[in-house]
Structures are given as structure tokens and as C-alpha cells.
Image (tube, coloured by chain):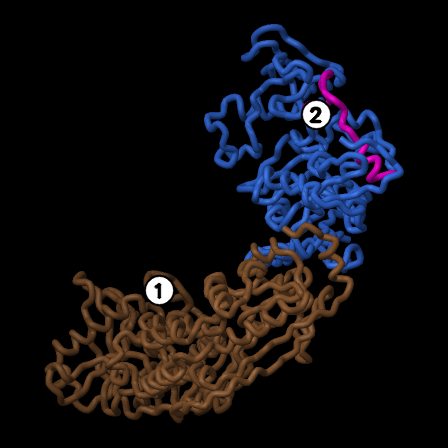
Chain colours: A blue, B brown
């Protein structure tokens, strides 16, 4: 990982460290686009925006935009999931008790039409000791907002009724992402980001806390390919780090279990790497990803920044054309032009406000 | 993938780029293309059997437009094999096709042993680029790469440093070049298929295109939904981030051998855009033969359309035959096959006029009672035909060759509405508006039903031929002086049959050019004259 040295200029490599050049203006432009994106407009003032950036080739630009947006979240003290963590337990308990517990279609949400994406196994784990579990009890009272847990499955063993939301911070739902780091894990290292965004003042608490407001929608090639593309772009001053290692997608950063960037795979019918109900910005990497994002209900109010390459098969380009055309019934199209980076052209679809 | 995105972005700081179209004028190839187009224009593309011939012609032209291969390899066998039965082309397909086929083969024979000028041009271009410092790549179909490499090897060109691009994936992975040499026109499909991004997302400053004369790029090529390119007539291809200046250089290659003259009809063929024409997307009119029937009606066919023909006063075997439309003799009867039907389903029988009796009766009444008001009402509702009065007199006549009625569906709907025929009727077990059922009846009488189901054309044709032979004596004795004869040709042994109408042909006239939609319909001669 990078050692901070404010005197050497930041360099980048697009070929996994073989050749280096001083950080070019286009990298700065796309980092800043994500960094300065006004957040939560879609949900707060019903002005959802879809920015589409047409690029002359396939490059990891979507990762740069995502890195900018994630960095903006590091400096915002409210950008963590603490406030809604306890709530997510209720949502999880509701899914488990009403749908998953007695479901005989394990797990075919599209057949069951339950609206969920994956099965809730019905228990919580402790962040420091994965073997410590608490099971969702049928005694949970949703109306009164009382969560009941048992130490053994099927309502057996000791019973626990956590009243203080802070109790929940140490636990996370099975197959989910911990809110806080375990005692043995390291905080997210932002020394490289501090060099890339010199004016950023990082909120220390956020470096050990998960957040789920930004989503990175990868292309149909899958997460492994996307990650490999992001690994080829590297930052350097004294030592170097890849773009992939700076993106806090669950499992991408070594030594941490946190997630501050949800990964959405546009393969097949689309899937999330974790539970997501509060996304306010989606960065879509390619036409397939944009297409999947626009049809995903969970992104209904989230802004979208889509990065698409002009080098595509004809049918893909026509698919994009039809996609943009279809949005015209709800959105006004604005041409932003090629002001940002030469060769890149941007348009923005802004949700029409009904007066 | 390109490893220096900065360099790529930097190329956009200057908008201007250039396309140099080197158009090769080589008379034998131009005339060869015209001969193949001459054959193609005579074909009936609604007939699956003829579509194979059309496909073979398309394939030859498509290869010719994008290949550097020798003519011996590329054209000889392909041209010979356009038709399977080469010996009987004149009899089966008519004079015009035969003459164009002979001419094409003769030109190919004279080309044997000659170098392909596109290859010559490519070698010159590459040799000069390699002598300089410009980086370049060759964009051509994948199948051509080996051929080009072999030719370069023979010409002493070092191929190790040459990049070849053929697909979108190749183009995506490629680095930047000064020049991309594109062999053939830029199109969306076929061998000339070219990544749209070559124009919308250039990786070079100059494209050198090596093409035969009059081989334009497809206007729809260069698509991008966000930054579309626009072609203007001043020789520019522009988008908001790129600006291509198109320059054309003629490369004239002399040819001293004699080229056989074209047929009189083929004299009018000029080269414009073979691939669009052959793909069927062109709106150009096609050659047609008019078969005049009786009562002022006629029907247009492509000259090569195969028809079952019945001749009077001949023995069983000679009485019925299959001929090209262009070779039919006046006085013969042509068989128009209706849609498959069963006995219970009398509506689809050719000659059925259950509904026409009703609307014609109403029409006569309306015309008698207050004709001026009636005409005014029709015009007000949109039936504003020139000569409406005489048209109505014509529609009132009883069914003969066809059910006399307006040519356009919309006009017929207005007529029924004004006549007050707005009720629903039971037709083929469905309740539908009267005018729809009556229009179906009219369409069937015009022979339009045969446009739909040509899947079993071979089988139906042989069944009709067999039936005409079997019933030869009956038809000969019953037909007398009439111009029309109806018979049912059993098809599946369970009561189903095809209704067949024999129509007498009074005259056969070539020299018509009509859009596809007007073929195979029995129409008023007055209307058909438009296409003369």
C-alpha cells in the first residue's frame, strides 16, 4: 500500500505497472465527477438523473467515477449504515419468517415471486466470532418493533430481546456484510486517496464502517473480469496500488470485511453482492450494465452515471439507442457535449417534473 | 485493449480526419457487375427457389467488393454455378437471364490470368507506407487475411509488422495508427461489415478505402446513439467530436480485350449500389412482364416467375406445363392458386362473392337514388379519387376476372361505411366488420392469397400440373370460349384442396418496372400503366 509523500506527483499506469505517466487530466475529470456528484437528488427532490458518458474505447473510467463517489462518502460523517442497521434486522426477520422459513422452493425467487433476491437463512452472526449466532424467533413483534432472538434454531435455547440499536452494531445478518470491522481487521487505508484528493478530510469512523448508498454495476462479463480491468489501472507515488484495491467492494480490499460499494452483476437477471435498499447512486459500466440498472426496481430513485464505449457491436449500439429512446417518456434529454474530456461525449436524462 | 488512453483522447483535440476513397475503374468488372444485376432484376424473389439464385449473386458481388483474390479463384466457379442446370437456362429462365449469364461468363473467361487491381493497389499502398514512418493496419474480412498475407509474401513484403483488423473485438483491442486501409465499402452486414466505431470512434487520422467504382458506403453505417455521424453532400462525415473529409481518387485500370455488348434491356442498368440493391432494401423498381387478362385486367410478374400454364387443343402431356412468365404465349391460360381450403370453408374459394353481392347491390341502390349526394359523401369521407363516377360504375359490375372494387383497402372501408355496411359478420368462425370480410374476398379474387403461402410451392405446383393433366379432357371440353375456369385441386386426402382459377392471357408485354408490392396481383390495366 502507498506511503504518503506529498512532494512526488501522483502517477498512473494503464498496463498494470509496466509504464507510468503523470496523472492525466482525464483521470482527474472522472474522479472529480464522482467526487462532486450531488447525492440523493433522486429520492429527496424526485429529480433522478441519468448521466451517460460515451467513450472512444473500453477503459476503467467507471471505476474512477466510483472511486470519486466513494471518497466523497468517506468524508461525510453521516455516510454509514449505523442508522438503518437495526432496521435491516427487522427487514431480514420479516423475509425469513414470512417467506423463507417455510418456502419449498429453495431458492427460486423468480418462481416464488416473493420479491427477494436470495434466501434469508434466519440468523445473525457476531463480527468478531462468526460461530456466535442468534436465531430469528417467531416471537418477533413487527408491529411493536420488538426483535426476539434465540440462541438455538426453532425458537429453542436462551432468548434475547435487544432493545438498544447499538447492540446490533456487532452483529450482521448471515451472508451479509458486518457494519463494523472485527477487532483483528484493519481500517480501510486511505493514504493513496489522501494523495489523489488532497482536500479530502476523512472521517475516521467511516474507515471502519460499512455503507450501502453507492452501487457499482458491472458488465455481463462478470465480477472477475471487471476486477481484472480495474487492477490494470494503478496509482503510484512511492509505492503503488491498483484501482481495484481502492474500491471498497466486499472482498476486493485485502484485510477488510467491510463494504462501502455494493457490486451489482448485470449477468442474467441481475444480482447484488449484499442486501441493498438504500442506493442513491449507481455507476454502470457498459451498455449491459445500464440496461440492467434501468430495469432494476431497487434503483428506482437512484441517480445513474453510465459509462459506455462507442466500440461495440451494432446490435448493442441499437439496444442502447432504444434504451435512451424509451426513457424519453419520463426524462428530458440534455446534451452536455464534449466539454469534459476530448473524445468523450456526455448526455444527461433528467426526470421530468410534473407541475 | 489500448494501453494509453491519454493518447487516444489527445487525438480528439484536432477534429479533422480524412477518408481517401480510391475508386478503381476497371471496365470488365463494371460490366460483369451489371450482368449479374441484370440476372437479379429478372428474378422473382417471392419464390424461394429463385431466392437461392439471388443469394448466389449477392454472395459473388459481396466477395468481389471485399476481396483481393485472383479472378480465377474468386469468379470462375462461382459464376458458372449461379444456375444448377446450365444447359437449359434459356428455356427455364428466359432469354434475358440467359444472355446476361452468358455475358458474365464470357467476361470472367477474359479476366482469367489477370491481376486483381484491388490487390495491386493494396500492394502499392502498403509498400509506400512501409517505406515511410506511418503506422498502419488493414481492415478486411477475416477470410481474406491469409490470402493477403500470401500475396504480400509473393510480393516480398514483410508481413510480421502488419496489423489486420476484421471485427469489433479486433478494433477494440487495437492501438492507434496513422492510417487504416479499408478494403471494400463500409456496411452493416455481410463481408463488407465494418465496425461503426471506425467512423464514430476513430483510431487513425486517415482511412484509405480501396473499392470498385460506384460502391458507396451504406448510409446507415457509422451509427452511434449518443454521437451520431451525419453524411453531407459536400463530402463530409461529421459528428460533434469527429470530422471526416472524404476525398475520392479515381484509379483507372486500362483493359484492351473486347467486352460483349449487353442486351437491350440491360443497356439501362447503371452501377449505383449493388449490395443495397441485392439485399432487397433498395426501393428501386424491378423488371416486370405484364400478362393482360380480359375485362381490362392484368397481372405483373418478374420475368423469371414460374407459372403453371394450360394450353387449349393439345394432348394431355403438352397441354399443361411450367413456364417463366416471360415465355408465356398469348392464348394460354395461367393457373392462379388460391389459399388452401376445405369444403366447409367456402369463403376462401377463388370466385366466392358472398359479400360482394351485398355491397354491390347497395352500391347500385345508392347510385340510383341520389348519386350526387352519394358521391359528395364519399369524397367528404376521403374517397376522393380522380374519376370517381366512372370508378363507381366499374365497381358496380358483377364479378368477372376479379371482384371489381377499389384498389386501396382504405378506400373500400370508406365505401362500405358510406353505404351503411357497418355490421359485424361471421367470417371463418370470427365476428369481424363487414368491410374486412368483403375485402378478404376481394383480395382472394385478385390472387393475393398466393402471396402468403409459398412454402410448398414445389408440391403445389406439381399437384396443379398433375390435376390439369388428369382433367385435361374435361377442361378442354368445358372451357369453350370462356376466359376463366375454376377447379379444385385435392391436396391432403382429407377433403382439403387448393382452389385454382385458369385465366386466359390475352397479351404478354415486357418492359414494365414496378415495386415488389404490385407483383402477382390482378389489377386494372389502367392502374398497371403507371409502371410502364
Q: Main secondary structure of the magenta part?
A: loop
- The reply to whether residue A83 is in sight is no
Tell me the residue that label 1 is attached to: B426
Question: Chain for mark 1?
Answer: B
**Span shown in magenta:** A178-198
Numbered disc 2: secondary structure: loop
Q: Are marks 2 and 1 on the same chain?
A: no
Front residue of this view, candidates B14 and B127: B127
Question: Chain for mark 2?
Answer: A
Numbered disc 1: secondary structure: strand
Snapshot quadrant of residue B322: bottom left
Q: Position of residue B482 (x, y in %)?
A: 21, 89
At horizontal 68% and vertical 17% (from top left) the residue drawn is A127
- Side of B103 relative to B278 (left or right): left
When the figure is inspected, residue B379 is found, relative to residue B164, above or below; the finding is below
Image mark for residue B380:
none
Q: Position of residue B294 (x, y in %)?
A: 30, 90
- Side of B64 relative to B18 (left or right): left
When the figure is inspected, residue A347 is found, relative to residue B230, above or below; the finding is above
Image mark for residue A256:
2
Q: Position of residue B129 (x, y in %)?
A: 63, 69
Q: Position of residue A298 (x, y in %)?
A: 65, 39
When the figure is inspected, residue A166 is found, relative to residue A289, above or below; the finding is above
Snapshot quadrant of residue B211: bottom right
Residue most extreme to the top: A158
Front residue of this view, candidates B450 and A75: A75
Whether A219 is among the magenta residues is: no
Please identify the quadrant where the N terminus of chain A is shown.
top right
**Pointer 2 with pointer 1, Cβ within 8 A:** no
Whether A191 is among the magenta residues is: yes
- The reply to whether residue A85 is in sight is yes
At horizontal 48% and vertical 70% (from top left) the residue drawn is B67
Amino acid at each position: 500500500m502507498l506511503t504518503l509523500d506529498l512532494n512526488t506527483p501522483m502517477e498512473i499506469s494503464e498496463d498494470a505497472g509496466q509504464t507510468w505517466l503523470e496523472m492525466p487530466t482525464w483521470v482527474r475529470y472522472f474522479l472529480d465527477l464522482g467526487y462532486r456528484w450531488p447525492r440523493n437528488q433522486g429520492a429527496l427532490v424526485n429529480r433522478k438523473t441519468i448521466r451517460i458518458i460515451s467513450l472512444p474505447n473500453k477503459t476503467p473510467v467507471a471505476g474512477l467515477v466510483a472511486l470519486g463517489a466513494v471518497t466523497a462518502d468517506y468524508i461525510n460523517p453521516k455516510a454509514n449504515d449505523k442508522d438503518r442497521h437495526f432496521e435491516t434486522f427487522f427487514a431480514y426477520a420479516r423475509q425469513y419468517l414470512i417467506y423463507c422459513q417455510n418456502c419449498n422452493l429453495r431458492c427460486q425467487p423468480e418462481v416464488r415471486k416473493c420479491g427477494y433476491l436470495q434466501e434469508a437463512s434466519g440468523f445473525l452472526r457476531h463480527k468478531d466470532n462468526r460461530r456466535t449466532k442468534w436465531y430469528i424467533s417467531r416471537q418477533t413483534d413487527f408491529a411493536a418493533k420488538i426483535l426476539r432472538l434465540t440462541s438455538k434454531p426453532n425458537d429453542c435455547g436462551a432468548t434475547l430481546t435487544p432493545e438498544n440499536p447499538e447492540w446490533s452494531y456487532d452483529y450482521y445478518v448471515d451472508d451479509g456484510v458486518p457494519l463494523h470491522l472485527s477487532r483483528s481487521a484493519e481500517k480501510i487505508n486511505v493514504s493513496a486517496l489522501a494523495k489523489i484528493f488532497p482536500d479530502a478530510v476523512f472521517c475516521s469512523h467511516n474507515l471502519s464502517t460499512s455503507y450501502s448508498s453507492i452501487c457499482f454495476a458491472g458488465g455481463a462479463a462478470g465480477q472477475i473480469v471487471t476486477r481484472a480491468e480495474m487492477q490494470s489501472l494503478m496509482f503510484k507515488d512511492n509505492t503503488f496500488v491498483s484501482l481495484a484495491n481502492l474500491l471498497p467492494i466486499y472482498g476486493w480490499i485485502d484485510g477488510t470485511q467491510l463494504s462501502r460499494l455494493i457490486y451489482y452483476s448485470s449477468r442474467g437477471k441481475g444480482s447484488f453482492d449484499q442486501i441493498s435498499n438504500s442506493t442513491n447512486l449507481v455507476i454502470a459500466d457498459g451498455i449491459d450494465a445500464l440496461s440492467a440498472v434501468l430495469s432494476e426496481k431497487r434503483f428506482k430513485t437512484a441517480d445513474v452515471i453510465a459509462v459506455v464505449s462507442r466500440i461495440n457491436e451494432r446490435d448493442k449500439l441499437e439496444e442502447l439507442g432504444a434504451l435512451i429512446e424509451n426513457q424519453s417518456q419520463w426524462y428530458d434529454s440534455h446534451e452536455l457535449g464534449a466539454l469534459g474530456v476530448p473524445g468523450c461525449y456526455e448526455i444527461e436524462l433528467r426526470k421530468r417534473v410534473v407541475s | 485493449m489500448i494501453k494509453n488512453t491519454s493518447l487516444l483522447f489527445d487525438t480528439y483535440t484536432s477534429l479533422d480526419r480524412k477518408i481517401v476513397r480510391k475508386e478503381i475503374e476497371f471496365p470488365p468488372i463494371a460490366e460483369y457487375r451489371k450482368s449479374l444485376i441484370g440476372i437479379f432484376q429478372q428474378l422473382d424473389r417471392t419464390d424461394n427457389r429463385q431466392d437461392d439464385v439471388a443469394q448466389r449473386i449477392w454472395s459473388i458481388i459481396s466477395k468481389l467488393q471485399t476481396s483481393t483474390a485472383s479472378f480465377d479463384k474468386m469468379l470462375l466457379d462461382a459464376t458458372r454455378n449461379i444456375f444448377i442446370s446450365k444447359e437449359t437456362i434459356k428455356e427455364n429462365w428466359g432469354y434475358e437471364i440467359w444472355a446476361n449469364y452468358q455475358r458474365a461468363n464470357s467476361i470472367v473467361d477474359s479476366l482469367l490470368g489477370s491481376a486483381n487491381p484491388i490487390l495491386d493497389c493494396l500492394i502499392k499502398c502498403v509498400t509506400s507506407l512501409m517505406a515511410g514512418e506511418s503506422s498502419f493496419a488493414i481492415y478486411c474480412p477475416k477470410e481474406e487475411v491469409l490470402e493477403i498475407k500470401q500475396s504480400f509474401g509473393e510480393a516480398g513484403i514483410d508481413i510480421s509488422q502488419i496489423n489486420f483488423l476484421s471485427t469489433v473485438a479486433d478494433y477494440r483491442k487495437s492501438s492507434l495508427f496513422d492510417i487504416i486501409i479499408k478494403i471494400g465499402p463500409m456496411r452493416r452486414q455481410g463481408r463488407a461489415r465494418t465496425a461503426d466505431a471506425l467512423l464514430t470512434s476513430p483510431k487513425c487520422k486517415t482511412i484509405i478505402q480501396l473499392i470498385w467504382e460506384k460502391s458507396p458506403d451504406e448510409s446507415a453505417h457509422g451509427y452511434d446513439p449518443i454521437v451520431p455521424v451525419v453524411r453531407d453532400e459536400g463530402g463530409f462525415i461529421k459528428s460533434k467530436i469527429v470530422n471526416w473529409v472524404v476525398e475520392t481518387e479515381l484509379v483507372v485500370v486500362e483493359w484492351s480485350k473486347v467486352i460483349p455488348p449487353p442486351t437491350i434491356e440491360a443497356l439501362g442498368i447503371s452501377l449505383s449500389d449493388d449490395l443495397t440493391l441485392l439485399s432487397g432494401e433498395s426501393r428501386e423498381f424491378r423488371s416486370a412482364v405484364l400478362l393482360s387478362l380480359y375485362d381490362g385486367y392484368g397481372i405483373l410478374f418478374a420475368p423469371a416467375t414460374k407459372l403453371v400454364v394450360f394450353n387449349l387443343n393439345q394432348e394431355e402431356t403438352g397441354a399443361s406445363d411450367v413456364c417463366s412468365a416471360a415465355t408465356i404465349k398469348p392464348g394460354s391460360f395461367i393457373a392462379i392458386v388460391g389459399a388452401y381450403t376445405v369444403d366447409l370453408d367456402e369463403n376462401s374459394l377463388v370466385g366466392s362473392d358472398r359479400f360482394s353481392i351485398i355491397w354491390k347491390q347497395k352500391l347500385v341502390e345508392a347510385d340510383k337514388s341520389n348519386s350526387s349526394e352519394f358521391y359528395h359523401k364519399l369524397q367528404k369521407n376521403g374517397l376522393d379519387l380522380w374519376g370517381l363516377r366512372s370508378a363507381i360504375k366499374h365497381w358496380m359490375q358483377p364479378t368477372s376476372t376479379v371482384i371489381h372494387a377499389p384498389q386501396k383497402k382504405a378506400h373500400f372501408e370508406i365505401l362500405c361505411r358510406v353505404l351503411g355496411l357497418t355490421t359485424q359478420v361471421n367470417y371463418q368462425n370470427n365476428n369481424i366488420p363487414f368491410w374486412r370480410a368483403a375485402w378478404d374476398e376481394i383480395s382472394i379474387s385478385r390472387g393475393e392469397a398466393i402471396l402468403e403461402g409459398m412454402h410448398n410451392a414445389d408440391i403445389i405446383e406439381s399437384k396443379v400440373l398433375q390435376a390439369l393433366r388428369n382433367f385435361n379432357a374435361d377442361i378442354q371440353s368445358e372451357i369453350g370460349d370462356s376466359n376463366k375456369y375454376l377447379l379444385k385441386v385435392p391436396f391432403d386426402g382429407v377433403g382439403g384442396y387448393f382452389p385454382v382459377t385458369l385465366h386466359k392471357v390475352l397479351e404478354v408485354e415486357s418492359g414494365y418496372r414496378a415495386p415488389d408490392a404490385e407483383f402477382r396481383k390482378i389489377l386494372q390495366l389502367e392502374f398497371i400503366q403507371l409502371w410502364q
